[in-house]
Amino acid sequence: MHKEKDKIKIIPLGGINEIGKNLTVIEYKNDIIIIDCGLKFPDEEMLGIDVVIPDITYLKKNVERIKGIFLTHGHEDHIGALPYVLKEINVPVYGTKLTLGIIETKLKEHGLLSSVNLNCVNPKEIIKLENLSVEFIRTSHSIADSVALAIHTPLGVILHTGDFKIDYTPIDGCVADLTRFAELGKRGVLLMLCDSTNVERPGYTMSESTVGETFQEIFSKASGRIIVATFASHIHRIQQIISAAIKYKRKIAVSGRSMENIMEVSAQLGYINAEEDLFIDIDCISKYPNNKIVIITTGSQGEPMSALSRMAASEHKKVNIIHGDMVIISATPIPGNEKLVSKVINQLFKKGAEVIYEALADVHVSGHACQEELKLMHTLVRPKFFIPVHGEYRHLKQHAELAIKLGMYRNHIILANNGDIVEMTRDSIRKNGMVTSGQVFVDGLGVGDVGNIVLRDRKHLSQDGILTVVVTIEKESGSVIAGPDIISRGFVYVRESEDLIEESRKLVKEALRECEKNHVTEWAVIKSNIKDVLRLFLYEKTKRKPMILPIIMEI
Amino acid sequence: MHKEKDKIKIIPLGGINEIGKNLTVIEYKNDIIIIDCGLKFPDEEMLGIDVVIPDITYLKKNVERIKGIFLTHGHEDHIGALPYVLKEINVPVYGTKLTLGIIETKLKEHGLLSSVNLNCVNPKEIIKLENLSVEFIRTSHSIADSVALAIHTPLGVILHTGDFKIDYTPIDGCVADLTRFAELGKRGVLLMLCDSTNVERPGYTMSESTVGETFQEIFSKASGRIIVATFASHIHRIQQIISAAIKYKRKIAVSGRSMENIMEVSAQLGYINAEEDLFIDIDCISKYPNNKIVIITTGSQGEPMSALSRMAASEHKKVNIIHGDMVIISATPIPGNEKLVSKVINQLFKKGAEVIYEALADVHVSGHACQEELKLMHTLVRPKFFIPVHGEYRHLKQHAELAIKLGMYRNHIILANNGDIVEMTRDSIRKNGMVTSGQVFVDGLGVGDVGNIVLRDRKHLSQDGILTVVVTIEKESGSVIAGPDIISRGFVYVRESEDLIEESRKLVKEALRECEKNHVTEWAVIKSNIKDVLRLFLYEKTKRKPMILPIIMEI
């Protein structure tokens, strides 16, 4: 019995075999803590879905033991599910200052701010719970105020790196607390969970400050307006744009709601270093010469509704791209966004702008550790056990191989799945069972009301459209008194295919007559006959398979 | 009058501001020639579309002047529209041996082979037409038998490079005919149309033979089966796999219909160099030890129905991925395919295979010229006028800048659009008018019967599904005698939203009652009322906007 209690459970509910919706559960005795609470953006096949969040059935069942949600940083894939999760389980939230600042805006939108218990923690601080304590350790990432978490347990330390890179010259001067990692490593770390995003890339990720040098060079040469698109949350990138603007005596205007929000929060919390009068309203840009203007904007991923996309498509109300504008896209397309970004680049070039993007200059660096940085982390922390996280399977697998090359035992590494219960003692680690896990689709106001059947229908509709067949039948006699009417959407041009629809009507009529003749009155059978006859006919004529929806009205 | 006749028209009908569906028209007096006749694969937003081909209205109108279609090589984006175009305009086709070999398979499938006039041309040969003559000049590309075309006109030479790279050590030993390019350049080239695909990449594209070295190294170490996925048409890549197999005494099996087709054609035409007994049937692979097997397969782009994807998903009937298999993906994901390829890589890793792809080893090189190669071409050919082709606008624009840096006058360069009539004399070039151009969608058997309205409906359906509202009304009285019935697809889980649908029914009923009360009998008005009331209600409740399709049956 005593033995049973001296186990720690690690249960990832998201972030394994995927990049997104990070959420890891750690349990010891009466304490459950949650590390991160992120969302994922939908894949192409998740038609109409807005965002995807982790299934938290397990958390709802164990809510009374949950001591809190501990956040490593303020990116959507680490905090984006919070509003949805907090509606279900209202537990305390712990994070650094900027992380909480970003969350507050989010919770306000969801009408949750007043009911949530937010706790600001500084790096080096330790939060003591019943059996566990959680230490915040500074790291570097593509957002300010990122941390790793060391969970101190009676069995040993669990270190979760969060998302990190090693940056010796970060913009805020706060280098990752390598000394603390070394110290923990020396005393003995039982388990490490480590970011795997860039494990396929050899060498080192460049320092954020190298981007600033590129900005300075571009700014020194630009003779028109400068428009820079980047991630709204990338405060350090934005600070470097600001610094270049100050140096080259340009005013700054901001466009894009998320950019405005985060810049306001960052400025309030002291994360942005600039005089108030540096900023001008986007409405006032025409009052200044072009070479005195910088516009900071969203849309670095080519998102169709973003400010930059609207500028490129001449749909932005305040900014009209003109010959001589210099547009810098300070980001790399996330896989899946390449075509969207390319479309924006083409449009901007066509309008006569100069466009600078990653293929042409060093205007972006990653926020994640490459191989040599991962080796440094492993070497400092020297964990006994290891779970690679934050990656697709290819990344987790290669991260495991990297650890093995550094001397780790293969059987001390767990390649987990979301939902796996990883059970750990002082000297063993293994998978032991699973809990409910999965993805929950958010579509508009609906959370979880769209599932695979609805998505399958949307997919079907998207490929070949729908053909609705309506017929009114007299209940007593079973004879058709109106219809069949056929209405199609998304199938063919109606005008060009009147014959096709007319022939379809005839076939349905025949099928109905046949049913009447054979005294078939079961609706399901009649409908199925209609479907069969149309499916065959339409496939033969068009090689398409529209959804066929027969509707029988009875009077 | 005489002057008017001494103009050449260049009319791109595809391949400009896009990568795909290449088709360029060149006209002089009574001669029209067509260079290439390609298709494009659909963008994400072209839901349900199979392929996209150029609009050839202009060609149909001028069919009697068309002397032939001249093909630069056998890739889909240069030959894929042929079956559709030849059905409309049956004109002679000219191409090199392998190009025609590939086309024959295609025409056979479309039942066109017997009716088409195919003419095999060797590099250095010249085809004489009424006023023009067309010379074939050998190049290197990621398919064998690629050529540039020099069109000799009384006004001067037009050089179309086709897709090319400069490879000093090509697999077939046939280096591009640089001497001929130099010769033409020395005598004077009036206009060059040049491949722009890789203009953003500095330096040189590596030689195809470097990939062979990587194969040799991988083969020397592999202890299990080797499975290589690459483009079916990449004969030289396949030859290198064959050479490595011979060296390491492995038998070869082939999987994937397009790979089987092209390998058969290539072998027949002598483009593949191997003893017959090197190949074994895919059914027989289990008869050999694993370390004596190589499987060459399709699916290097992660295409969901391809052989490699089926192997990765355990859906391939003949090949079951096992621990110890070495899978080489010898290709780069085409923009848009990154996630599909990544999915396959993850699945293969999970099955215990080793997977080698571009991020991990040099198993692919491009088929297109990088900046230094483009500079070489420009320097040899020294054209008076220049039209960059085969690229998005960003590529064409940067190719123009590259030419200007090499000394070309800015006003001697035309950044064209598809459909532009570019008019050229001995000493001038300018745009002068446009012809009909655009994209025609092929969906199943339909060519052009799906247009923007159908696509808009498919998009709408894919996002939030459809709600069909049916009501039967008595003609005389206008009163409702059956319904309203509401059926939804792709909107919400029906079971979980019975209340929503029931409330919708009530609202429609009310709206109908209101219409009856106000003696509204116009169907359009009734339908529009139904739509309005439902749209508002559903958006308020779900923040979704399903398509609403009201149907009124009258008896």
Image: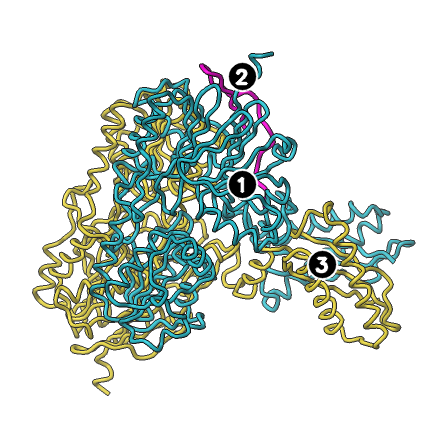
Chain colours: A yellow, B cyan
Work out which quarter of the rendered image holds the N terminus of chain B and state it: top right
* Viewer-nearest residue: B307 or A421: B307
B426 magenta-colored: yes
CB under 8 Å between discs 2 and 1 = no
The quarter of the picture where residue B197 lies is top left
Q: Is residue B285 above or below residue A107?
A: below
The Cα atoms of the two marked residues, 2 and 3, are separated by: 58 Å
Q: Which mark is residue B93?
A: 1
Image x and y of residue A464, in percent? 62, 55
Q: Secondary structure at mark 1?
A: strand
Exactly how many numbered labels are in the figure? Answer: 3
Q: Disc 3 on helix, strand or loop? A: strand
Q: Does A141 sit left or right of B534 as displayed?
A: left
Evaluate whether residue B128 shows in this view. Answer: yes
* Residue A260 visible in the snapshot: no
Q: Identify the residue position indicated by label 2 in the image.
A: B6
| Amino acid type at mark 1 | Val
Mark nearer the N terminus (2 vs 1): 2
Q: Which residue type carries mark 3?
A: Thr
What's drawn in magenta, residue-wise? B420-441
Give the labeled residue for mark 3.
Answer: A468
In the rendered view, does A520 fall on the left or right side of B120?
Answer: right
Subunit under mark 1: B
Circle 2 or circle 3, nearest the eye: 2
Chain under disc 3: A
